[in-house]
Image: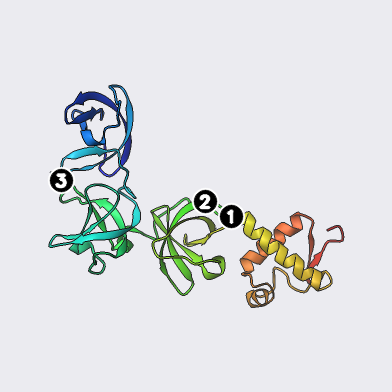
Amino acid sequence: MLQLGKVYTLQVIELADIGVYLETGEADRLLLPRRQVPTGTAIGDSLRVFVYLDSEDRPVASMRMPVACVGQFAYLPVVDCNAVGAFLDWGLEKDLLVPFMEQHRPMEEGRSYLVYIYVDKVHGRIVASSKIDKFLDDDKPHRFNAGQPVDLIIANSTDLGFKAIINHNHWGVLHHADVAGRLSFGQSIQGYIRHVRPDGRIDLSLRPAAEVLDEHGSLIVAYLEKQGGFAPIHDKSSPAEIARVFKLSKSAFKKTIGRLYKQGVIDIRSDGIQLSPDA
């Protein structure tokens, strides 16, 4: 069964004056209006289309793709506000409605907002909401693993750094120490799962784990070289001492010296770390 707000590849089964009809696998066919039909389209061709409702609330296909689909978040501009609600430009001819009850704060024309796109169960229409917290649950089970590449949307800032939406379905945190450049609210960016905590909360990074470890490793090796090859700091040292010397968390420090040890670059002693004679 086709779902509103999703993208499908469908086969042309009939040509008509008003457009072409597409096979849906159900009793009803789906119309692609004539103005959207590619030149030379023939019966049997497969077309990639987006399914939504036309101005009369009838399911219809579109060759134009929206900025985001149902079940996704997007940062979209308001193009109109009226007695019904606010309307967002999401890349289609028909703008996307945000009902008044789904506005976190009253929306203003000309401004952009982070919204979640969904199908209203009461009216069966595609709408959006800026009350994004109710569509994300930190306690929801997930299968994210450390090092996994993910898509992020920057949602807001906190004392720790930035909260980001991971793959449109979960919260994560980018700590200030892991952000070198400027991030903007609503910005879409690729990131990586840095660490999954025991409670399921997720720490993020904007760089692959190997790249971060390499940088941290270079920092530690450079320090050891300046100190004659030895530093009285090890995996039992306090987080405060490690942060003071290397500007790293204890977790990052332990991962880095573990990798350097496996590479034969350092030796880990009970009283500290030392450059290997063969390094």
Question: Could you tell me the amino acid type at mark 2?
Answer: Pro
Closer-to-camera residue (64/180)? 64
Q: Tag 3 or tag 2, which sits nearer the N-term?
A: 3
Numbered disc 2: secondary structure: strand
Q: Are marks 3 and 1 in contact (CB under 8 Å)?
A: no
Question: Could you tell me the amino acid type at mark 3?
Answer: Ser
- Quadrant position of residue 2: top left
| Viewer-side label of 3, 1 | 3
Report if residue 33 is visible in the image.
no
Q: Marks 3 and 1, how far apart in space? A: 45 Å
Q: Residue at x 56, y 69 (%)?
A: 177
Q: Residue at x 76, y 58 (%)?
A: 261
Q: Kindly give the residue lying farthest to the top in the view shown.
A: 43
Location of mark 2 (residue): 149
Image coordinates for residue 80, horizontal then vertical, percent: 20, 60
Report if residue 267 is visible in the image.
yes
Question: Could you tell me the amino acid type at mark 1?
Answer: Pro
Q: Tag 1 or tag 3, which sits nearer the N-term?
A: 3
Location of mark 1 (residue): 208
Label 3 CA crowd tier, 10 Å (few <14, some 14–19, many 20+): few
Q: Is residue 241 above or below residue 43?
A: below
Image coordinates for residue 99, horizontal then vertical, percent: 19, 60
Image coordinates for residue 262, horizontal then vertical, percent: 75, 55
Figure quadrant of the C terminus: bottom right
Location of mark 3 (residue): 55
Q: Is residue 25 above or below residue 183?
A: above
Label 1 CA crowd tier, 10 Å (few <14, some 14–19, many 20+): some
Q: Are marks 2 and 1 in contact (CB under 8 Å)?
A: yes
> Colour mode?
rainbow
Numbered disc 1: secondary structure: loop
